[in-house]
Amino acid sequence: MPRIFGKTRFIIAQMEDFLDKISEGAMGFELGIISYLRDCCSDQNCEQKLQQLIEVKRRSQELRRLIGIELYTEMLIPDTRGDVLSLLQDLYSLIDNCEDSFQELLIEKPQIPDIYKQDFIDLTKAVVKSVETIILAARFYFRDPIRARDYTSQVSFYETEADTIRLRLKQKIFESDLPLEQKMHLRDSIDFIDEIADNAEEVSEWLAIYAIKRAD
């Protein structure tokens, strides 16, 4: 029995490390976007930030895989094992989204007029806040599933905020005198960023279900 308890504590510590990496990836995404928008990020520095994000993603994937192996080989938390593994995969998909979005930005290099840069920053911050909130909910899922549900509901708030900024920014752009091609390019960049908040909300809906099952 002490060995089982020890293994359980070890797994929980690994899960915390995993969540830390997802949070680190979200913060790295935000810093990368802001640097790009403020023109203080050279191609070399942007590539460095991308590689840092890729490394965080790689480490997250490694932790997710190790946790899954431990859960099955040690027969830990059998009642909720499937939910935990699904949750880890869902959370991993968020850092995958962050990396994809930032990489697309660096590949396409949209020319963003200064007048819209603060809106892009506001959108990015709202998106990252939705990810940070779902991470907080996930932490409580393992400690206090009832409280986890409180935080999952907050994710929708930040997703709605991101949607509001997205629509307002698009309206500004398409009412401007910019060439249509540039408008379309900016629209796609906006959607790439906003999609992360949409996915975070979807993860929060599943996490709310997992929390209800675990609390019963």
Image (cartoon, helix red, strand yellow):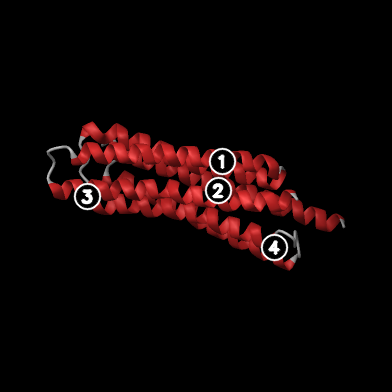
Q: Of marks 2 and 4, which one's residue comes earlier in the chain? A: 4
Q: Mark 2 and 4 residues: CB-CB less than 8 Å, in contact?
A: no
Q: Label 2 vs label 1: CA separation?
A: 8 Å
Q: Which mark is residue 204?
A: 2
Q: Label 1 vs label 3: CA separation?
A: 33 Å
Q: Mark 2 and 1 residues: CB-CB less than 8 Å, in contact?
A: yes
The amino acid on which the numbered mark 3 sits, given as a three-letter code, is His
Q: Of marks 3 and 4, which one's residue comes earlier in the chain? A: 4
The amino acid on which the numbered mark 2 sits, given as a three-letter code, is Ser
Crowdedness near tag 3: few (<14), some (14–19) or many (≥20) residues, C-alpha within 10 Å: some
| Residue highlighted by disc 1 | 153
Left or right of 21: which side holds 84?
right
Q: Mark 1 and 4 residues: CB-CB less than 8 Å, in contact?
A: no
Expressed as whole percent of the image width and height from the top left, the position of residue 36 reads 30, 41
Q: Which mark is residue 185?
A: 3
Left or right of 172: which side holds 142?
right
Crowdedness near tag 1: few (<14), some (14–19) or many (≥20) residues, C-alpha within 10 Å: some
| Residue highlighted by disc 4 | 70
Report the front residue among 185 and 146.
Answer: 146
The amino acid on which the numbered mark 1 sits, given as a three-letter code, is Ser
